[in-house]
Image: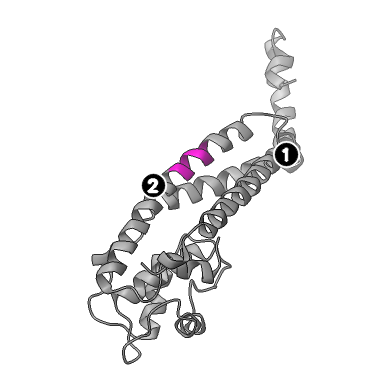
Amino acid sequence: MSFLKRWRGAPACDIIAGKAKLSASAGPGGQRAERQHKEETPVEAQKSLVRGKLTEWDRLLEEYRLPGWEDFPELPLYMDQVIYLMDQYLSPLPREAEQKAVTPAMINNYVKLGIIPRPSKKRYGRVHLAFLVMVCVLKQTISTAEIKKLVPAELSEEEARARYEAFSAVFRAGKQDFRENVQKDAASVFGAEDTSANDLVFRAAFMSGLWQNLAKLALALYPEENAEK
């Protein structure tokens, strides 16, 4: 019960005298008690943390755009320039702090395995950058061998551009669908007092597995003879 409620209807002299008690209770001990009273429960704290992270991630996704073909530098680049640009292009993709989106060793390995075209005199052009963006996004779900079916390194520049632009269009549509579904699912979790944020994790993991299985099923049906067309 607050002091105001306790003193409602009391004589004025008693209220004036009580000011000293109120001031004393507002010291460090009183402030600590007030903070403790306002502390969130473990479930509420978990929801607040997840809600904050989801809100920030949704903002980043909303603003994020894959580079267009014309956004890639026209002049060929050296390896260190490629690494820098790929970090900018793929900044929202999940990875550990300080971890690069792609490393020189990874790029050399992709070339060796025939996942991306070979550079010309150790320099990388638009085709290489487009391949690297697609590979880095797709490898989160499917294997590099499966990526080769979708975007074979033997594509001409014109074919590579068409494939990249189709990939970017699907990415934009998929990103919007994903944001809308996350907002809907997160609202149902945060709106229920007896529901923890674990439910959102369970659903995300379950749906991720289903979509990954669908991708692999579609790739298994992909005609081998048309894989490089």
Q: Is residue 208 above or below residue 10?
A: below
Between the C-alphas of marks 1 and 2, the distance is 34 Å
Tell me if residue 67 can be seen.
Answer: no
Residue type pointed to by label 1: Val
Element assignment for label 2: helix
Element assignment for label 1: helix
The structure residue drawn at horizontal position 36% and vertical position 81%, both measured from the top left corner, is 81
Find residue 122 and report its horizontal and vertical position in percent.
35, 90
Q: Is residue 54 above or below residue 101?
A: above
Q: Which residue is mark 2?
A: 173
145 lies left or right of 159:
right
Find residue 83 and report its horizontal and vertical position in percent.
42, 78
Q: From the image, which quarter does the C terminus lie in? A: bottom left
Q: Is residue 228 above or below residue 79?
A: above
115 lies left or right of 49:
left
State the extent of the magenta-drawn residues as a range: 177-183
- Is residue 61 on the magenta stretch? no
Q: From the image, which quarter does the N terminus lie in? A: top right
Q: Which mark is residue 43?
A: 1
**Colour scheme of the picture:** one colour
Residue type pointed to by label 2: Ala
